[in-house]
Image (cartoon, rainbow, N blue to C red):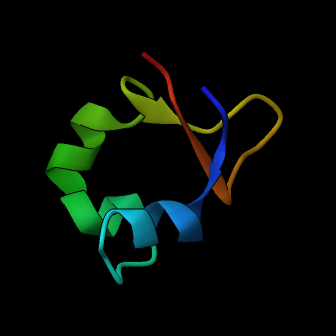
Amino acid sequence: MPAVATKQLMAAAGSDSGTPRRLFGQKLWASIDQVYVGFPPGKSRGHYQLLV
């Protein structure tokens, strides 16, 4: 899967939250992060990628 800029991802989700963590909430995000979505190789912020 290609990497998507965080801003583009949040706009596609129809959210004005700045990050997925704020969109899903801390507890739910902890169960999603690095399981279903995460940073692409070589990136530590600003982009996300589906991992499954």
Q: Quadrant of residue 22?
A: bottom left
Asked if residue 29 is positioned above or below residue 7 in the image, the reply reads: above
| Residue farthest toward the bottom in the current orientation of the protein | 16
Outermost top residue: 52
Q: Quadrant of the C terminus?
A: top left
What residue is drawn where x is 23% and y is 33%? 31
Q: Picture coordinates of residue 30 (x, y %)?
A: 28, 41
Q: Position of residue 28 (x, y in %)?
A: 16, 46
Q: Give me the residue at 34% from left, 60% from top.
A: 21
Left or right: 13 with respect to 12? Answer: left
Q: Quadrant of residue 40?
A: top right
Q: Which quadrant is home to the N terminus?
A: top right
Give how far across and how far down residue 25 sits, in percent: 19, 61
How far across and down, in percent of the image, does residue 51 sit?
49, 21
Q: In the picture, residue 10 is in which quadrant? A: bottom left
Task: Name the foreground residue: 13 vs 30.
Answer: 13
Q: Residue at x 43, y 72 (%)?
A: 11
Vertical placement of residue 14 versus 9, above or below? below
Q: Residue at x 66, y 40 (%)?
A: 3
